[in-house]
Image (tube, helix red, strand yellow):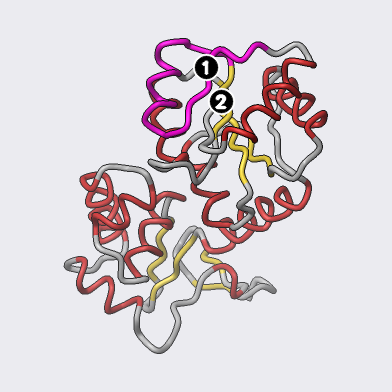
Amino acid sequence: MADDHPPLRASVRRALEEHGFEVCAEVATAADSVAAAERERPELCLLDVHMPGNGVAAAAQIAARLPETAIVMLTVSDCDDDLFAALRAGVHGYLLKDMDPARLALALEGVLAGEAALPRALVARVLEEFRAGRRRRRLLLPGGRGSTLTAREWETLELLAEGLTTAEAAERLLVAPVTVRRHAASIVKKLHVPDRRSLLRLLREPERLPTEEDGIAYSSAGRARGPDGS
């Protein structure tokens, strides 16, 4: 269990031990949580998002080094950036600190049984993000060229379009800068532009590029069709 507030750790520990959990380590920072996880190899890690050192980064490291360990974030933050960053890091649950401590134990038991742990309000956001991702997955370019980007390529493209540098995008995605450069190179190739600068100019054009969200699809021969098939 990792959180930089000792009273909260004590409260959560009592609630979990009353329901049969054994807390093998308590720490206050992201670095210590990674070290404790590697030392104890627990069945589950309960991490705070905003503890010193970045709880999401710690979750990503634990997920990479201990794939058999379940990871759940326990946080006061219900903002989308924290939620989706945690999910990208590989967590199995994202719970809020204002929940009933007794329900926390039940949620963690569910995670150990193979379930995900998310409050209902956050589940709705995850579903909407999934639907939005499916709608924007295929990018249609002028001249009848269409290209399908992967989910991670879309994430990279959106961050670069916001003006983030390679290093900043890598930090947001919890990957190495070389991975961002590789995704950018793949996008440039798929969209038939000469370089990344040309790609960003294309994205910043006043006329928005059409996507499947506009009700337009492409036949296998590449001919544009409207939603009525014409």
- Residue 6 percent across, percent down from the top left: 57, 33
Q: Quadrant of residue 75?
A: top right
Q: Which residues are magenta?
A: 22-43
State left or right for residue 138 relative to residue 175: right
Q: Is residue 49 above or below residue 112?
A: below
Q: Are marks 2 and 1 in contact (CB under 8 Å)?
A: yes
**Residue ID for mark 2:** 1
Q: Is residue 9 above or below residue 41?
A: below
Which disc number belongs to residue 25? 1
Quadrant in the picture for the N terminus:
top right
- Residue 166 percent across, percent down from the top left: 24, 57
**Which amino acid type corresponds to the residue marked 2 in the rendered image?**
Met
Closer to the camera, 169 or 4? 4
Name the residue located 26 percent from the left edge and 42 percent from the top edge. 176
What is the spatial separation of the Cα atoms under label 2 and label 1, in whole angstroms?
6 Å
Q: Secondary structure at mark 2?
A: loop
Asked whether 83 falls inside the magenta stretch, the response is: no
**Which amino acid type corresponds to the residue marked 1 in the rendered image?**
Ala
